[in-house]
Image (tube, rainbow, N blue to C red):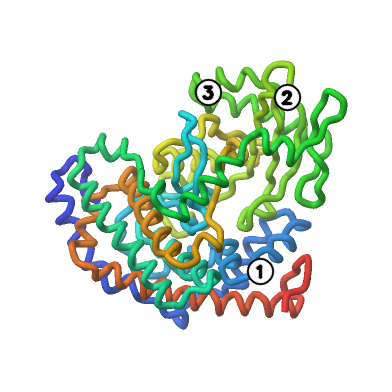
Amino acid sequence: MIATNCGIRERMKFGQLQRRKLKRSGLALWDGKTRKHEPIELIQASNRERIPDLVPIKMARMALSPFTFFRGAVEIMAADLAAMPSTTIPAQICGDAHVRNLGAYAAPDGRLVFDINDFDETIRAPWEWDLRRLGTSLVLSGREANHSDGDCARAVYTCAKTYRDKMAEFCSMTCLEVAKYRIHRQFSLAPASSIFMRAERATPAHLLSKLTWARGQVRRFREIKPILTHPAKSVARGVLSALKSYRQTLPPSSQHLFDFYRATDVAFKIVGTGSVGTRDYVVLHFAGDGAADPLFLQVKEAVQSAYAPYVNSPEIGLHQGERVVRGQRLSQFQSDLLLGWTSIDRAHYLVRQLSDHKGSISNQDLAGQGLVEYAILCGEVLARGHARSGDAAVVSGYLGTNDRGDKALAKFSLRYADQTTKDYELFKRAIRRGKIKSTRPFL
C-alpha cells in the first residue's frame, strides 16, 4: 500500500493501478457455481460457538425472509467475498453494512446523528466488501418493500455513485476537514426524518417504562421470557465486577460521568438477529437517590469477526471488544461517550449505552422514492467512514470519474441478492428436514 504522506496525485495513480487486480467492471462478477463451501455448513459452524438453547431463536428470526436470513448469515458472504478477486485497497470496514445497521443515535453533544451504528464485524479489509454488502441489502430490503428489480438496481447505482462522488470530494478537502465532516443531508430526506422521529422517542426514560417495573422504591427489570430474563446471582455479580475493568477503558471525562451512577439490576437480553446466541447483558443504573436519571448499559459478548479467517489484519490478536471500539471510533463522526470493553470469565465483551436515542429504517420508509433517497444517504455515510479510516485518494483513483464501477456494483447486488434468496430456500428446507432446529416451523 502506498504511504499516506505521498501526494494526492500519487495516491490516486496508485488507486488506478489497482484496476489491474480487479477491473471496475469486475465488481459485477458473481458465480455461485464456483463456491467451495456449503452455506448451511457455515451457519452450523457458527452456531456451535453460541448458546445452544438460543440458537433455535436465531434460526427462527433468520427464516422470516431472505433479508432477515442475510442479516443473520454474514459468515456466508464473508467467505464468498474472500474467495473473489479484490482491489486490496483497505479501509476499516463495518463488515455488516446493511440498511438496518445504519441509523440515528445520540452523539456526545446530545444531538442526534446518522451513521453506521453496528460494528460487531468490523475489521481492516478491502473497502468494496462493505459496498457490496450494502448494495445487496438495498436489493433485498427493496424487494420486501415491493420494489421491482429495476427500482432496486437504480437504488444501488445511486448509492455507489454517491459513494464515488463523495470520495472525489474528500480528495479536495484537508485531512482535518474530512475528520470533521458532518453529514447534514439526512434532515431533508423523508426516510431519515422518520428514523429521527423514532430515535427521539428512544430515551432512557422510555426504556425505563418499557423494560422495568417498580417494587416499592426499587426498580428492577421485567421478566419477558425468553427476551429479557434475570441470570443467576453469580452471573450478575460477574457482570457487575467486570464494569470495574470496563471503567478503565473510558477516557477520564467519561469515567467521571460513569462514577455518578450506581448499578441496581442485571438482566440477560436477546437482541437483533445476527447476535442471537451470544451473551448479552443489560445493567440498570441510577444517578443520585431517585429514578429520574437512569442509565442502561449493554454488556455484549464480542466474538471474532466473520472476516478474520480471510484477512491479514493487525486487529486479529486484539481483545475482541477493543477491536469493535477501535473500528467504531475510526469510522464514526462521534461515538458513544460510554463506549468501552471488558472481560468476563475470559470471554470478551463490548460495553455501550443501550438504545440511546437509536432509530433505524423500516419497510414503510423504503416505499416509493424512499428507497433511492435512503440509498443516497447510505452512500454518503459509508464514504465518510471509509475516508476517515482509509485513503479517499486511493479509492477515488480506483473508481475514476465515470460510472463503470457504479453499474457493476448494481449488477453484483442483484446477482448476489438472487444467490441469497437461493441460500434462504436451502435454509428453510434444512429447517423442514430437521437439520436445523428452529423455535417454530417455517414452510
Q: How many marks?
A: 3
Taking the image as shown, residue 217 lies to the left or right of residue 372, namely right
Q: Position of residue 395 (x, y in %)?
A: 26, 55
Residue wearing tag 2: 291
Q: Residue furthest right?
A: 216
Q: At 72% from the left edge and 35% from the top edge, which residue is drawn?
A: 208
Determine the image quadrant of residue 433: bottom right
Task: Look at the image and tell me whether residue 133 can be seen.
Answer: no
Q: Circle 1 sits on which residue?
A: 64
- The residue where tag 3 is placed is 254
Mark 2 surroundings: few (<14), some (14-19) or many (≥20) residues within 10 A = some
Q: Secondary structure at mark 2?
A: loop
Q: Residues within 10 Å of mark 1 (few under 14, many from 20)?
A: few
Q: Name the amino acid type tagged 2.
A: Ala
Q: Closer to the camera, 210 or 190?
A: 190
The image quadrant of residue 355 is top right
Look at label 3 and name its amino acid.
Ser
Task: Give the residue drawn at x 27%, y 52%.
Answer: 166
State which tag comes first along the sequence, 3 or 2. Answer: 3
Q: Are marks 2 and 1 in contact (CB under 8 Å)?
A: no
Q: Is residue 149 above or below residue 124?
A: below
Tag 1 and tag 3, C-beta contact below 8 Å: no
Where disc 3 sits, the SS reads helix
Q: Point out the frontmost of discs 1 and 3.
A: 1
Give the numbered dot on residue 169: none
Are the residues at dot 3 and dot 2 in contact (C-beta closer than 8 Å)? no
**Percent x, y of residue 142:** 49, 69
Of badges 3 and 2, nearer the viewer stands 2
